[in-house]
Image (cartoon, rainbow, N blue to C red):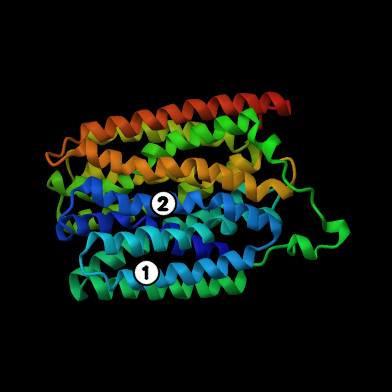
């Protein structure tokens, strides 16, 4: 439950960046490609800090990471409310500060699940990651309504108080099963991770490459759906809720596939769902009216939800011991971070001032397709090594 509150307050809040994207595009005087660097850098930090956070987690500093990340993240959101429509101020508070906080929080929130669940690990991770979907429903509705009624600064502060309350609960609830390595008795000591072996693991390398390409295009609808709908004449009030609809549908996409993954393996679930996500991205070009956008939001939310929730599981399943869990996830997230950093700004640059939507759509669809191919190859190699198709 504590991990769920962390994901709700961090990844769930980031899923509302489409609201900020729409607001900043009319108040910061910058093109969409520049504005998207704010959200993409926060996402980059969330993943990139996985490597050092993973090492600290494996050493037993789970609580320290969560406490420190909670302070940095909450403070950054309150600082965001004080910005005066200056790009550099917003970037420092939301991109750098909030990104640093989420980077310290995200990995321990997902990795600590491995301490308590083995047989139902994917399902447990799915339930935790579903917190991001709930946050992706709550925060867009909250911010859209409050910004229009009480102003940007007060709306951000109100959301920051909700984040702070969630993180206080998380700090009280999250408890790793293992104490710090230096305090463990001899019978609880785990062998330290063999970094050379991890980096030379071919299936692991391909999984990271696949995750990078998928992440490169995956977040385009999360950042641009609201703007795209408004450009197609969808009522502004409904456009505000499309992001919430998408995230609401992803609750089921982040739980149900993970439940099945515990029975047939995470690779066997993430590959078809990633391919279906790519198909949906290409289908973006056919959206014309309100009904189309609602159906797209529901389907994309469900299909794309599986990728984020299953990603930690495909890295965990390659670990040879519990002592490798944190570092495996951390290195994998670090590789994906560069896709998260550059994907949406590239989409914004391709979109241009004349809103040529086909260009970012093709880019995002092709990259997710490419990532799916690499994941399929990684799955083949892992299945061969394990001697079973259930991987």
Horizontally, is 285 left or right of 311 in the view? left
Between 308 and 20, the one nearer to me in the picture? 20
SS state under label 2: helix
Tell me the distance, in whole angstroms, between the alpha carbons under discs 2 and 1. 15 Å
- Which residue occupies 39% across, 38% down? 216
- Which residue occupies 58% across, 55% down? 53
Return the disc, 2 or 1, that comes first in the chain's sequence: 2
Residue 69's x, y, as percent?
A: 51, 66
Q: Is residue 259 shown to the viewer in this render?
A: no
Please say if 231 is above or below 278.
Answer: below
| Residue at mark 2 | 43
Between 81 and 142, the one nearer to me in the picture? 81
Q: Quadrant of residue 268?
A: top right
Please say if 37 is above or below 62.
Answer: above
| Residue at mark 1 | 77
Residue 301's x, y, as percent?
A: 38, 46
């Amino acid at each position: 439950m504590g991990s769920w509150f962390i994901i709700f307050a961090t990844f769930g809040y980031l899923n509302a960046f489409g609201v900020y994207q729409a607001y900043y595009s009319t108040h910061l005087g910058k093109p969409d490609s520049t504005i998207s660097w704010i959200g993409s850098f926060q996402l980059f930090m969330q993943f990139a800090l996985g490597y050092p956070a993973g090492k600290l987690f494996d050493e037993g500093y789970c609580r320290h990471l969560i406490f420190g990340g909670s302070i940095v993240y909450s403070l950054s959101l309150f600082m965001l409310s004080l910005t005066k429509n200056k790009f550099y101020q917003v970037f420092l508070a939301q991109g750098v500060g909030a990104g640093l906080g989420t980077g310290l929080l995200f990995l321990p929130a997902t990795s600590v699940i491995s301490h308590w669940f083995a047989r139902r690990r994917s399902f447990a991770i799915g339930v935790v990651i579903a917190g991001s979907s709930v946050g992706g429903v709550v925060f867009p509705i909250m911010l859209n309504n409050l910004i229009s009624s009480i102003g940007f600064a007060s709306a951000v502060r109100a959301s920051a108080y909700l984040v702070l309350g969630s993180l206080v609960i998380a700090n009280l609830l999250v408890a790793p099963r293992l104490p710090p390595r230096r305090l463990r008795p001899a019978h609880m000591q785990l062998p330290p991770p063999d970094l050379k072996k991890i980096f030379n693991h071919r299936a692991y390398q391909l999984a990271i490459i696949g995750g990078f390409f998928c992440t490169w295009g995956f977040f385009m609808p999360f950042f641009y759906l609201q703007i795209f709908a408004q450009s197609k004449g969808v009522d502004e009030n409904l456009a505000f809720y499309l992001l919430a609809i998408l995230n609401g549908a992803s609750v089921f996409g982040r739980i149900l596939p993970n439940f099945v993954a515990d029975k047939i393996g995470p690779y066997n679930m993430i590959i078809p769902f990633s391919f279906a996500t790519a198909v949906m991205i290409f289908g973006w070009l056919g959206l014309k009216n309100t009904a189309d956008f609602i159906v797209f939001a529901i389907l994309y939310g469900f299909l794309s939800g599986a990728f984020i929730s299953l990603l930690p599981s495909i890295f965990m399943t390659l670990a040879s011991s519990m002592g490798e869990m944190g570092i495996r996830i951390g290195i994998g997230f670090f590789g994906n971070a560069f896709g998260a950093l550059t994907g949406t700004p590239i989409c914004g640059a391709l979109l241009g001032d004349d809103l040529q939507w086909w260009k970012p759509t093709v880019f995002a669809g092709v990259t997710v397709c490419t990532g799916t191919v690499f994941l399929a190859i990684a799955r083949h190699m892992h299945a061969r090594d394990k001697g079973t198709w259930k991987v």
